[in-house]
Amino acid sequence: MKKLFVVMLLAFPVTLSAQTLTGKVVDENTSLPIEFANVVLLQRSDSAFVAGTATDSLGFFSINGNQGNYLLKVSFMGYQTRFIDVNSANLGTIILSGNEKELSEVTVSGQRPVFKMESRGISVDIQNSRLKEIGNAMYVLGQLPLVDFSAGSLTVFGKGTPLIYINNRLVRNYKELEQLNSEQIKKVTVITNPSAEYDASIKSVIKIETLKQQGDGLSGSALLGGGTKQFLNFNYAALINLNYHFNHLDIFTTVSYNNSADITPTINSTTTYHQTNRTLVIQDSGRRTYPGQFINSEVGAVYSFNKNHETGIRYKYSGMIDYTQNQQNDESVYLNDVLQEQYHSIQNTIQNTHPHYLNAYYNGTFAQWLSAKLNIDFANGNTVTNQTYTDPSSNVITN
């Protein structure tokens, strides 16, 4: 019985009491340490976030975990993500294998982003890394050390949702990050210990610095993409950025358009038994989202008095036009394999959204110990939803 007990004990996951987990992350081919790799502790049961950190210049990490059953997630741009069972406090050497194609098929092997430790966090030189080719600012931030990008949101390990600034202007909507091309980003800084210039409730800040246009004149970029989710349902999107620079003034506009279509059929069946009778209910729902049009437009101006003082104003419209959903439901009821009832219904929903947003700001530095930030926001809009429901046919079958 004692031998049997020992075998059963070893078969179960190890439950950790409160302790510090340590280890080292290295490259598979060179055995060199990987600095700034993200190390995340997850609950084994549901993969919920517990704690996170980044490796140091020698590839070492330490992370605290309370009592529980854990997995360790180790990731770095250009390498395959690893999930490791946590069975002891010392996890030893963790080897990451290179991933030749990652981040929208951009080759990143052999080239790492340029990271630098600063007094309050980590900065990344985007222009001298492959991150500038990743697509947009949202994807860039999702690849940074100490930052997690999942379910469409950004969080900093142990610090929650960060404030995000683009050229010292507070970002109110993640759509701005999606519209900012990564090739336009010069530098990103992840601040984990904000200074007194921020409210005491702010635990983390991400600052994005973009490239300044050299010389006067007009510049811009255009993107066009498309694809299908189901046969003959084509989705496409277009984005245009324009900027006119003269002396200290920048006048800019951004326009994006997205047209989407989707069909998602679902079939559910339920069987119940009562004494000697068997009831089967089959529900066939064909949910169709017909082309919805999404328009985002922005226009504004920024004036830089000098490197210490800047002011700007911008107007933004983000509309959802004639977003139509059509859902058809068919239900059949069988009793002991004999059709008893059939139902058919149609539901249509049309939604129009017209939000408007206006922002004006000023950022100034008067001395090393004195700065001022001013943000004025105005938002207005309306959403109109029309819904109809019809039951054109109901057929009850009698024997």
Image (cartoon, rainbow, N blue to C red):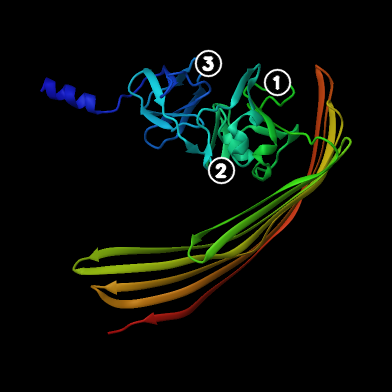
Please say if 127 is above or below 33.
Answer: below
Q: What residue lies at 38% left-to-right and 23% top-to-bottom?
A: 67
Quarter of the image holding residue 28?
top left
- Could you classify mark 1 by the number of other residues whose Cα lies within 10 Å: few (under 14), some (14-19), or many (20 or more)? some
Query: Of marks 3 and 2, which one's residue comes earlier in the chain?
Result: 3
Whole-number angstrom distance, CA of label 3 to CA of label 2:
30 Å
Q: Which mark is residue 195?
A: 1
Whole-number angstrom distance, CA of label 2 to CA of label 1:
28 Å
Q: Secondary structure at mark 2?
A: loop
Is 59 positioned to the left or the right of 209 in the image? left
Residue at the left extreme of this rendering: 1
- Could you classify mark 3 by the number of other residues whose Cα lies within 10 Å: few (under 14), some (14-19), or many (20 or more)? few
Whole-number angstrom distance, CA of label 3 to CA of label 1:
25 Å
Identify the residue position indicated by label 3 in the image.
57
- Could you classify mark 2 by the number of other residues whose Cα lies within 10 Å: few (under 14), some (14-19), or many (20 or more)? few
Query: Of marks 2 and 1, which one's residue comes earlier in the chain?
Result: 2
Is 333 positioned to the left or the right of 320 in the image? left
Q: What residue lies at 43% left-to-right and 31% top-to-bottom?
A: 42
Is 138 positioned to the left or the right of 59 in the image? right
Quarter of the image holding residue 139?
top right
Q: Secondary structure at mark 3?
A: loop
Identify the residue position indicated by label 2 in the image.
152
Image quarter in which the C terminus is found: bottom left
Please say if 334 is above or below 72.
Answer: below
Relative image position of residue 2 (x, y in whole percent): 12, 20
Name the amino acid, label 2.
Gly
Q: Which mark is residue 303?
A: none
Q: What residue lies at 40% left-to-right and 24% top-to-bottom?
A: 95
